[in-house]
Image (cartoon, helix red, strand yellow):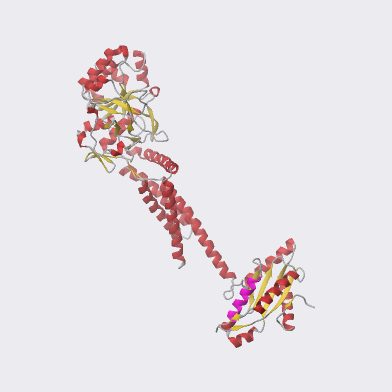
Amino acid sequence: MNKKKFDFIVYALIFILVFVAVIYAGKFYTFGKFIMGVEYKTFDIRQNIILPHKENNNNIIIIAVDDPSYEYITENFGTWPVPRDFWAKIINGLQQANPKFIAFDLLFTKRLGTLENGDLQLIKAVKDNKNVYLSMNFDNYPSLIRKPPVLPENLKINLKNGDIIKKSHLLNFSNCRNAMNELLEVTPNFGFINVTRDDDGIIRYIAPFFYYKNGYYPNLTTLIALKYLNIDPEKIYVKNNKLVLDKSHIIPLNPDGRAVVNWYGKEGTFEHISLWEVDNAINNNDIDFLKNKFENKIIYIGTTVTALADIKSTPVSFMYPGVETHATFLNNILDNNFITHFSFKADLIVSVILCFLIGFCILRFESVTYSVLCSIIIVILYLIFTVFVMDFFNVWLGIVLPMLCATVIFIAAYIAKYLLKSKDYEHTYKLAVTDGLTEMYNHRYFQEQMIMNVENVSRYGGNFSLVLIDIDFFKKFNDKHGHQSGDAVLRQVAQTIKKNIRTSDIACRYGGEEMSIILTNTAKEDAKTVAKKVWSAVRERKFELADGSWANVTISVGVACMPDNGSSPQELIEYADKCLYKAKQEGRDQVVGEID
């Protein structure tokens, strides 16, 4: 297997391991929650970036119970909530401007006791004006606190294939805070205003429908949108996680039945008219003001004052009025402008593509600078791309999972690249310092180690020994048996030497048929013992020749020691060489450690 193919397999295995690890980790609630929590923040950032490119619907107007209006009410009525006949006056007064709809983001739950006459006026105003829409909300209060009411059948919508909502723990409720029964008797125009927050307390999703007591109930805004668009509620249905109102208005739903809201701006994006101004115009019969502000408009009436606790946190503001979230939701429906959130599987596919590109850069460029720069550019381009597709295509592409995978791949690939390079370096270094025939260290390495050992002994004291070995009559052996057999004997002698020394000792091919052993931290007598052990092992071994025959060889050995026989590499080599020469002179096949 060539090096490129081996490297490719290594990187491929890294990619596979990373994605298997991510998929496995995705099964754990804590990991998924962490990923989603950070992803929410990236969504918020992108929403704020693209705000300047959005334009809200000017036909949606908010009558706000703001701070001046709250003071106006308390000055005139003494307390909040105001008497119900006040709202009856507001409804009837607004009708002079011929608005499309008047939607109350306020709850009329019980009669106000002694103010019964005001309740009756409100009931009459709602009954007489079919464009008025009222609110209720669901909850899960125990039945001991509030008996779950039976709601009128005409409030339900026969939503086809709505199991995604029925099965959602966020949208399936066991109790309801319903409106006055008298109001329920005079109008079916009731919607629900429940909102759900994410774990960080921010509203990013709104549910178009809720499930209660075996029935589907519309969000207040969904109901208004159906009326405004003249859509038959009996014809809407859910298909492939999409709520289909008609061909032009389709709401993509998350697996929990909620829709991702596309925000148009910070608080005050939709025109706010103070309630006190409206009341003043009605009291003064200022028809021009009313028509100018509200003719053919969709009006939401709700509180924006902090004291009344209907302030929400959204991706674009931490002080967003609750009533304006409904206006935003309606704007999304009318513009068919919801965000489609890609699934975990889609994020994995994106992660694979991103990691492939980064991996390609790491493999393509040998330069660390180029590969890092290329990877950073890829990441930046992807981040820009996620903003672009959210702005122009209303698609929420994941950032956190792809970035996490890309980071892990980048780190793992560079670790692998470093290890592979280290392995290549070790292999190259080994080739540079190893004799190809005997696989012993070569003469160059021998010289380096001699210098190192001499320096260590000179600095720290102690000793080390050098053993020089020469195969006896090797030239005659080559002439008789051939060079191939000679090479075979050299290899086998080298093997025998390495088997009979310590792993810390250094066996080298000194040149030709000469070999050497550097014995670290070894005194002269111990070195002689090692030399005799090697000499004996060679003498007793049968060596296989190139033609399959066997032969014996012997060696002559010279031993030197520092500091006994010298203080430099040259002096030690010279002494050991003289001992070796003496061994040859005295008949070979012996170990000599002293010169007379």
The image position of residue 136, as x and y in percent, is 30, 26
Question: Observer-nearest residue: 323 or 212?
Answer: 212
Query: In what quadrant of the picture does the N terminus appear?
Result: bottom left
Q: Residue at x 46, y 51 (%)?
A: 408
Q: Residue furthest right?
A: 596
Which quadrant holds residue 222? Answer: top left
The image position of residue 565, as x and y in percent, is 76, 71
Q: Which residues are magenta?
A: 486-500
Question: Observer-nearest residue: 301 or 149?
Answer: 149
Which quadrant holds residue 122? Answer: top left
Using the rendered image of the protein, determine whether residue 206 is visible from the camera's viewpoint.
yes
Query: In what quadrant of the picture does the C terminus appear?
Result: bottom right
Main SS type for the magenta part?
helix
Q: Residue furthest bottom?
A: 480
Q: Residue at x 41, y 35 (%)?
A: 199
493 magenta-colored:
yes
The image position of residue 411, as x and y in percent, is 48, 53
Q: Residue 338, relative to residue 64: is it above or below?
A: below
The image position of residue 48, as x and y in percent, is 38, 38
555 magenta-colored:
no
Apparent side of residue 247 relative to residue 562 in the rendered image (left or right)? left
